[in-house]
Image (spheres, helix red, strand yellow):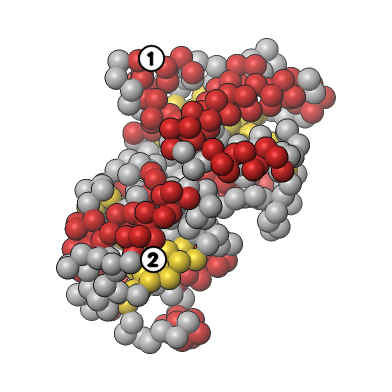
C-alpha cells in the first residue's frame, strides 16, 4: 500500500480505508506493508501489526512551521499543497526506485492518492510489479471537472495503472480514466461499529449527562471546506432547527484549516441549541460517540462513499446527508434518512427536524435499515475479497 497519510498519524477516511483494507487482507492470509509518503514519525498506536515505512523520513520543525504559515492563505495553500504533492511524489518515486530489494518483496503496489500516485507509478513503470489505484476523490474530481482539459488530464494521469478501483459510481466511471476500473465501495468495521443494547446505550449517555429523551445529532467530519461542516453549523442557527437537538462535532482537527475553522466557530455563536466540539478521535472513541447519538449529519460538498456515513449506519443511526457523490447510493430518502442539496443549511435544519419529530421506534426502524444494508454489502471481509479479485485479475 502506498499512501500519503496513514492511520499511524491521522484518522481521515482514506487513512482508515487503507488501515481496514490492510487488516482484511492480513486476515485473509496475505502480507501487507504500508509505505507512507508523508513525513513524520508515527504518533498513534495501531491494533494491526502491519509494517509502516515512512518513505521520506521526517520533516524538520522549520518545514512544519513554514507549512503552517502557508496554510492560512487559501490560494497559496492550494498552490503549495499541489506543488508539494508533486515534489513529494518525485522524491518518493526516486527513493523507491533506488531500493529494488525492497520492491522485489511485493506482487502488487496499491496506490491510494492521485497526483502523488500517478507520478510514483510512472517512475516505477519499468518494474515487474502490477500497480493498482483506488480513486479516493480529492484531486481527481477537482481535475476532472475542469472545463475541456479535465477528462484529458485524468485519462493521461491514469495510463500507468494496471487497474483502478472507485468507491462510487461517479469515481468508477470508465470514460474518465485510461485503466480498467472496478466499482468497490468503502467498507466499515461492522464489529467495532455496532449498535448497543438499550441498557448499555442509556448507561453511555448517562455518563455524558444525557437523559433518555435528549436528542443528539453528530457531525463526524473533519473541518475541511469540502466536508461542508460550515453548513451544518449554520443550520443550527436556523428557525427550523429543533432547539431540543444538541450537536456533537466529532473529529474536527481544527489546526489543518484555521480560517475555515474560524468561520465554523463564528457561525456557531448563533446556534439555537447546545453543541460540543471534539478534536481527533480514536476509532473506539468515534464508535462510542456514534453509539450515543440519535442522528448523523453528513453535510459534504464532495464525497465518495463516506466512511463516516457507513460507520453511523452500522450503529443504526438515521442519516441526514447531502446528495453528492456516492452518498445517494447509501442514503435513501425517507427510508434510512434524508437527502438534501449541498450547501443548504436550511435544508439540513428541516431534515433534522423531521427526524427529531419521529418516535424513538421510528428512528430505530430507519437505523435498522442502514445496519442491514451495511452488513450485507459494506463489511471489510466483503471489500477485501473483492479487492483481492482485482489483484488476481491483473496478475494473470
Q: Quadrant of residue 147?
A: top left
Q: Is residue 180 visible?
A: yes
- Bin the neighbour count of mark 1 within 10 Å (Cα to Cα): few under 14, some 14-19, many 20 and up: some
Residue 218, which numbered label?
Answer: 2
In the image, 83 versus 317, the foreground residue is: 83
Q: Residue furthest right?
A: 101
Q: Is residue 370 visible?
A: no
Considering only vertical position in the picture, is 252 above or below 210?
above
Query: What x and y, as percent, mark residue 279?
Result: 52, 62
Considering only vertical position in the picture, is 360 above or below 62?
below
> Residue drawn 70% across and 54% down?
43
SS for dot 1: helix
Side of 368 where 73 appears, left or right:
right
Query: What x and y, as percent, mark residue 256?
Result: 52, 48
Residue that numbered label 1 is attached to: 152
SS for dot 2: strand
Considering only vertical position in the picture, is 1 above or below 158?
below
In the image, 339 versus 149, the foreground residue is: 149
Amino acid at each position: 500500500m502506498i499512501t500519503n497519510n496513514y492511520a499511524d498519524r491521522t484518522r481521515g477516511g482514506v487513512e482508515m480505508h487503507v488501515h481496514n483494507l490492510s487488516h482484511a487482507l492480513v486476515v485473509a492470509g496475505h502480507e501487507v506493508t504500508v509505505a507512507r509518503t508523508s513525513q513524520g514519525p508515527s504518533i498513534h498506536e495501531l491494533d494491526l501489526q502491519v509494517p509502516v515505512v515512512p518513505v521520506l523520513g521526517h520533516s524538520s520543525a522549520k518545514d512544519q512551521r513554514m507549512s503552517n504559515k502557508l496554510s492560512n492563505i487559501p490560494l497559496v495553500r492550494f498552490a503549495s499543497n499541489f506543488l508539494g504533492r508533486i515534489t513529494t511524489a518525485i522524491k518518493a518515486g526516486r527513493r523507491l526506485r533506488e531500493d529494488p530489494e525492497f520492491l522485489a518483496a511485493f506482487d502488487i503496489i496499491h496506490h491510494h492518492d492521485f497526483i502523488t500516485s500517478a507520478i510514483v507509478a510512472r517512475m516505477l513503470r519499468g518494474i515487474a510489479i502490477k500497480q493498482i489505484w483506488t480513486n479516493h476523490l480529492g484531486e481527481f474530481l477537482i481535475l476532472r471537472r475542469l472545463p475541456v482539459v479535465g477528462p484529458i488530464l485524468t485519462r493521461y494521469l491514469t495510463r500507468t495503472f494496471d487497474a483502478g478501483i472507485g468507491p462510487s459510481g461517479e469515481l468508477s466511471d470508465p470514460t474518465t480514466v485510461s485503466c480498467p476500473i472496478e466499482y468497490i465501495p468503502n467498507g466499515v468495521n461492522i464489529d467495532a461499529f455496532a449498535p448497543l443494547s438499550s441498557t448499555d446505550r442509556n448507561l453511555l449517555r448517562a455518563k455524558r449527562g444525557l437523559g433518555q429523551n435528549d436528542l443528539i445529532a453528530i457531525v463526524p467530519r473533519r473541518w475541511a471546506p469540502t466536508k461542508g461542516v460550515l453548513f451544518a453549523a449554520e443550520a443550527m442557527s436556523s428557525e427550523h432547527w429543533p432547539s431540543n437537538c444538541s450537536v456533537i462535532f466529532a473529529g474536527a482537527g481544527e489546526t489543518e484549516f484555521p480560517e475555515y475553522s474560524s468561520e465554523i466557530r463564528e457561525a456557531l455563536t448563533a446556534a439555537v441549541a447546545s453543541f460540543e466540539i471534539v478534536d481527533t478521535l480514536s476509532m473506539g472513541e468515534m464508535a462510542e460517540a456514534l453509539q450515543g447519538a440519535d442522528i448523523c449529519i453528513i453535510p459534504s460538498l464532495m464525497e465518495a462513499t463516506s466512511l463516516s456515513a457507513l460507520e453511523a449506519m452500522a450503529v443504526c443511526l438515521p442519516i441526514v446527508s447531502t446528495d453528492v457523490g456516492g452518498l445517494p447510493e447509501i442514503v435513501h430518502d425517507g427510508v434510512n434518512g434524508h437527502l438534501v442539496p449541498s450547501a443548504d443549511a436550511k435544508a439540513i435544519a428541516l431534515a433534522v427536524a423531521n427526524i427529531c419529530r419521529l418516535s424513538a421506534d421510528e428512528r430505530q426502524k430507519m437505523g435498522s435499515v442502514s445496519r442491514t444494508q451495511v452488513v450485507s454489502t459494506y463489511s471489510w471481509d466483503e471489500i477485501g475479497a473483492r479487492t483481492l479479485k482485482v489483484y488476481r485479475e491483473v496478475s494473470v
